[in-house]
Image: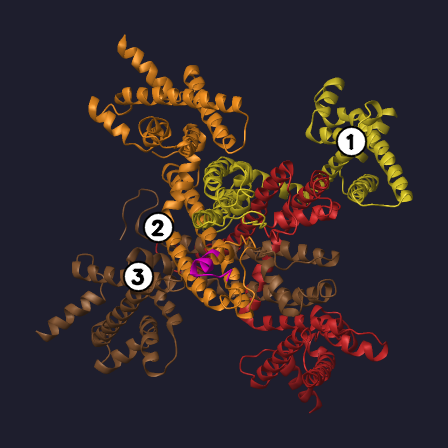
Chain colours: A orange, B yellow, C red, D brown
Amino acid sequence: MYKRFKQRIFEIIQASNENDLLSKIFDLFIIALIILNVIIVIADTFRLPDNIKVVMKYIDIFTAIIFTIEYLLRIWTADFLYPQYGKVLSRIRYVFSFMAMIDLLAILPFYIPLIIPIDLRVLRIIRVIRLLRIFKVNRYTSALSLVAAVLKKQSSQLISSMFIVALLMIISSVIMYNVENPAQPEVFTNAFSGLWWAVATFTTVGYGDIYPVTAIGKILSAIIALLGIGLVAVPTGIISAGFMTEVEHKTEAEKDYNQKHYCPYCGRRID
Amino acid sequence: MYKRFKQRIFEIIQASNENDLLSKIFDLFIIALIILNVIIVIADTFRLPDNIKVVMKYIDIFTAIIFTIEYLLRIWTADFLYPQYGKVLSRIRYVFSFMAMIDLLAILPFYIPLIIPIDLRVLRIIRVIRLLRIFKVNRYTSALSLVAAVLKKQSSQLISSMFIVALLMIISSVIMYNVENPAQPEVFTNAFSGLWWAVATFTTVGYGDIYPVTAIGKILSAIIALLGIGLVAVPTGIISAGFMTEVEHKTEAEKDYNQKHYCPYCGRRID
Amino acid sequence: MYKRFKQRIFEIIQASNENDLLSKIFDLFIIALIILNVIIVIADTFRLPDNIKVVMKYIDIFTAIIFTIEYLLRIWTADFLYPQYGKVLSRIRYVFSFMAMIDLLAILPFYIPLIIPIDLRVLRIIRVIRLLRIFKVNRYTSALSLVAAVLKKQSSQLISSMFIVALLMIISSVIMYNVENPAQPEVFTNAFSGLWWAVATFTTVGYGDIYPVTAIGKILSAIIALLGIGLVAVPTGIISAGFMTEVEHKTEAEKDYNQKHYCPYCGRRID
Amino acid sequence: MYKRFKQRIFEIIQASNENDLLSKIFDLFIIALIILNVIIVIADTFRLPDNIKVVMKYIDIFTAIIFTIEYLLRIWTADFLYPQYGKVLSRIRYVFSFMAMIDLLAILPFYIPLIIPIDLRVLRIIRVIRLLRIFKVNRYTSALSLVAAVLKKQSSQLISSMFIVALLMIISSVIMYNVENPAQPEVFTNAFSGLWWAVATFTTVGYGDIYPVTAIGKILSAIIALLGIGLVAVPTGIISAGFMTEVEHKTEAEKDYNQKHYCPYCGRRID
């Protein structure tokens, strides 16, 4: 009886069975609560009348209670998640899992100020990360994991090109400082200004708060801006190739299977 | 006789037979009328002499009449478009089709102010959407449908990466507000300012109306701008791979056909 | 004797035989002259001392003479270029060829002011286009023609997506005008201001001379900026796929050749 | 004994054997020293108290000594690097290798001011390039060399498209100067201003210090900005295709090997 009840709780808070209505309602309730929290965090930056502030305070307390209960239930039912481990080990393992860490981070900013008198309201933004739960929906998880797999596979090429970019940025920022400082000392005050300019130029953001005015500075800036095109083109090429190979791999695997199991001339199955 | 006349009307307004001159003239006339309307909508935002305003008014009325007649004719001939349905059902089906909805939206802003006294001139811009009719030209329809097919196929990957971007934008906007508000309270007034900054930085638009001035803000901004490169690179990679697979699929299908119907050694046809 | 001399002239000015030293020297001389003209066109926009202006005038006359002689020689030897046509037809054909038109445009701005007293110095910039002759170098011609072939092949897809972009730009510019005009009437004066803003936002240039200040305007701008990412991603994907297919086509053709001419098991040639 | 000692020195400073602890410590020490120098170069642009300046001076001298010793040791052990050459030739070859040139450039700015009294502190930035040593780590070297190989292979296509871009930029800069100069003579002062604008627009940086105000100028700018999209799309497509072909080449080579060495029907190895 106790075990069946626990099993049911586990199903509701963890599994995402298509037919389990209660589990779906629970998921939607949590996501709605997270979105409500995101709205509060944003709303908190506006000047609001006191009665709204009070409502927000209550939602904050309510969220903290719900998230805490949920967190404790997840720890309690962790032995269903990792049945291969024991009662204690499965819980420890769960507590140190990535999602559990985020869940803990989402409730901690509520409890710490009760003990130590500091204002951690800003940290409530961490609750936004809980939105990652949306990826529990199967279709998006596999899509995201494909994106992650491609990025990981091409990581050494991406890191290499990013390293070259970082080198170029450091070098150009120091040169730019030395070129532009005499002309506009209050804009290019030090190499950090140069770096800020290098980022704005390389990424083609170009806010317009810092830009060269001397001829040499402009020529250097033009070169950096044109190289910035490469900053987009090279990783894009790497990532495109990554996606293609991933897709091709799957196609090749299917074709290989077909070639081994079907006669190429008559089309009949060979076993 | 009546049926042949109706058939002819249908051919003129719907079909795009290469040899049907009248149908072609009708298509060009409608497209010209749409373009004329686009020009009027744009011209209407300028300060113009009264006599031109009068001409524009007449064109407006003329367009409304033509579009209304065309819309009614399309409903009338809808049973030729969906011969499998009955007289009533085919028309209901047509009225709720995407293109018919746009056609209705294009004429409604003209009639509503005649009943309720409000100014809906702005809504005339909807007529611009009717330009989508250009895609009735075969070559462009298939091209556009290929683009749409690729975007749809890769949609879950694209949505996943857009979701991550949205998360990053919300988180960074709140952090940015907290970092920059003390330094420039009239620029970063609330989290919405932060979001506006996040969009400008992520998309590398960088208007220059809002940017960080503190050291921490600049570092955060640099990270966001560099991640913004990924905002271009990842979807581009996904879309490229999508186009490639689509193309390859077609090539593979052709090759498969050839392998089944032609001997790989002598090249003669096998049936 | 006369024919051999003419043949030699033709070889020098037209052919780009690797071993023909005189032809190479001639090519380099013309390219150097074009570059010198580019420098003059740029230099002409600076305030310069009179003696330099005189030198520039002489270079201008010298260039016009050389280019005129070259143009006439090319017409004279056109029957070697199109041996299949007659003496008159080959010359007419040459005069209306793309490169000959550019050559004529490059010298015309010099002669017209001698007859009609107008200043066409600005048109000297057309001489810059003559730099396209660099593509006579084989390696670059084939590269450029590959790029052109890919762009042409994917043209209907590219045009389709550009058309959608144009529609979006027109619609958003009119909406933006109506949204922002009350708030900043001197910035968003008419729909053209809206279009200018749409271009700056879609292409992510973002000069910062025009941007929304109202909440609705900013939300619309954010949507447009994010769609602007697609403006890069979709054509990039299309072009990438185009390059890939082109490359694959070549590889497939080679493989097909090998499969037909070499035994897949023993590797020996079959004919 | 002498030779074994020299061999050991060579192993420490040159080879990157996974198990050689001393070699690893040496590598990390040098990289740490380079990073320290980067920090100093950047810090040098700030206004700092005198005692820190003294510390920086000592680090500068220390770095110069270490780098000089390392440089000399590398020359000394160059005959192990190129065992095929003689004692003298191997050293000459090494001195003129790319990495040795950078090593020399990194120490020269320290010695020259001792002889000729000029300030070359700025040139210390060259030491940043020594960070390229990180690419001695195997995983990144191969990744970087793949990126380099792709860029090299596609170089003629990339150069061709860059050339077209350069032409477009020169032409549009001169036209833009002529269009905008009468309206804002202090902004578009000469064709260089036009070029600076062309770079900012083509690369979509758009600092906002220079932009057209006339109608014609804005139309031209819109065209250039939209073509700027191509500036990203075309090289990205070229590079993507390059990466894909490289990857495919490898896959094809593997498949060819399999096809030659394994029976396509029974899967058994054939030799």
N-term mark: 2 or 3: 3
Q: Which residue is mark 1?
A: B120
Q: Answer few, some or many: residues within 10 Å of disc 2's Cα (few below 14, many 20 plus, some between 14 and 19).
A: some
What secondary structure is found at the residue carrying circle 3?
helix
Q: Which residue is mark 2?
A: D259
Residue drawn at x 62%, y 62% is: D198
User: For the magenta stretch, what is the residue range?
Assistant: A186-196
Say if D95 sits above or below C250 in the image: below
Inter-mark Cα distance, 2 to 3: 54 Å
Inter-mark Cα distance, 2 to 1: 70 Å
Amino acid type at mark 3: Leu
Say if C152 sits above or below A19 in the image: below
Q: Quadrant of residue D21?
A: bottom left
| Residue B73 image position (x, y, % from top left) | 82, 28
What secondary structure is found at the residue carrying circle 1?
loop
| Chain to which the residue tagged by mark 3 belongs | D
D109 is within the stretch colored magenta: no
Residue drawn at x 34%, y 62% is: D49
Viewer can see residue A86: no
Q: Quadrant of residue D58?
A: bottom left
